[in-house]
Amino acid sequence: MVLPQPDQALAMVARDVRALLERLDPQARERFAGIGLALPYNLGAWLRRLDLPAEIFRRWDDFDFAAQLEEATGLPVFSENDGNAAAIAELFYGLGRRVDDFLYLFIGPAIGGGIVVKGDCLRGSTGNAGDVAVIAVAPGRLGSSPKSEDGRELLITRASLNALGRHLQARGIPVASPADMQAAFAAGHPAVQEWIEDAVEALAPAIWSAIALLDVPLIVVDADIDGGLVDALIRRLAVALDEHAPEARRSPRILHGTLGRDAGAIGAATLPMFFNFSPRASILTRDGGDSEFETGPARFAGLT
């Protein structure tokens, strides 16, 4: 997970936007609603836990990328954190077409999330609703897990691809990209299953805490990699949720997301439409029940 300096990234994005606009005829430019931008908030917050270079990542916290991009392009920029952006993509184009209420989890280098209730993505007062990465959990049991100073950790240190990559490297498997992690899973390396067990041990109580507050019937899980790894994680997580279920409570259903590694980018592209035509602006109609999810379906109309 290596980022360029903020000004370098700004120059690249602004150049791509200008190139895109040059390909549009005047009528198409008039319909251009704006730029959607998805990026993690507080990039400099978890450097120790993710073994990231402070000299690059902390500069992003002091750089208002959305404002700078708006100034560079002259176009409105709609910004959202990457977890919410991915959840918005799932809401508009995936399972959100059939279900109104779910907790969305995206496992990338970190772990992000989003909350969908009544067909709308909840943002919270600072845009950080669904920020599951900072849920407190017990320290990991893997030999590769960071040593906790106070007997506590955050979910990001256990249920993330960074944690998987760290564990694979500790077991002697070189990891240079998500494809290497997927290949290790395909090869049946036991280190991947060890990480799955450790991640699920942290995820199950965290999800039950979220369910206690949100009371949603569905958990949607997606990731930067696949090749069967997400489904393997979901199967183990379903068992763990049943094992941790509070008395008289039924475990939520868990489904694989529909957009994979492109979820955040698709959600970003959707942001101008989302902020201009949210469910509160009656873009949704609901007609009938959906016993599969025990909640009313969300049908999008007029999305052109």
Image (spheres, rainbow, N blue to C red):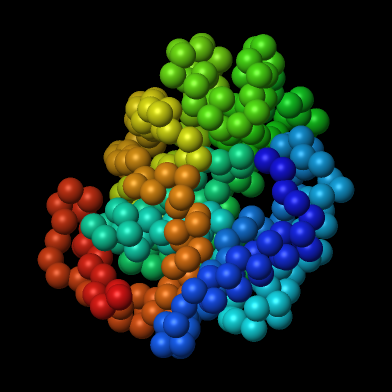
Camera-side residue of 211 and 62:
62
Where's the C terminus, which quadrant?
Answer: bottom left
Q: Position of residue 51 (x, y in %)?
A: 76, 35
The residue positioned 47% from the left and 45% from the top of the image is: 261
The residue positioned 82% from the left and 57% from the top of the image is: 59
Q: Position of residue 26 (x, y in %)?
A: 46, 87
Q: Position of residue 189 (x, y in %)?
A: 51, 12
Q: Position of residue 13 (x, y in %)?
A: 65, 64
156 left or right of 240? Answer: right
The residue positioned 39% from the left and 68% from the top of the image is: 120
The residue positioned 62% from the left and 19% from the top of the image is: 168
28 left or right of 5? Answer: left
Q: Is residue 268 visible?
A: yes
Where's the N terminus, which quadrant?
Answer: top right
Q: Is residue 114 visible?
A: no
23 left or right of 285? Answer: right
Q: Is residue 277 above or below residue 133?
A: below
Camera-side residue of 142 and 167:
167
Q: Is residue 49 above or below residue 214?
A: above
Which residue extends farthest left? 288
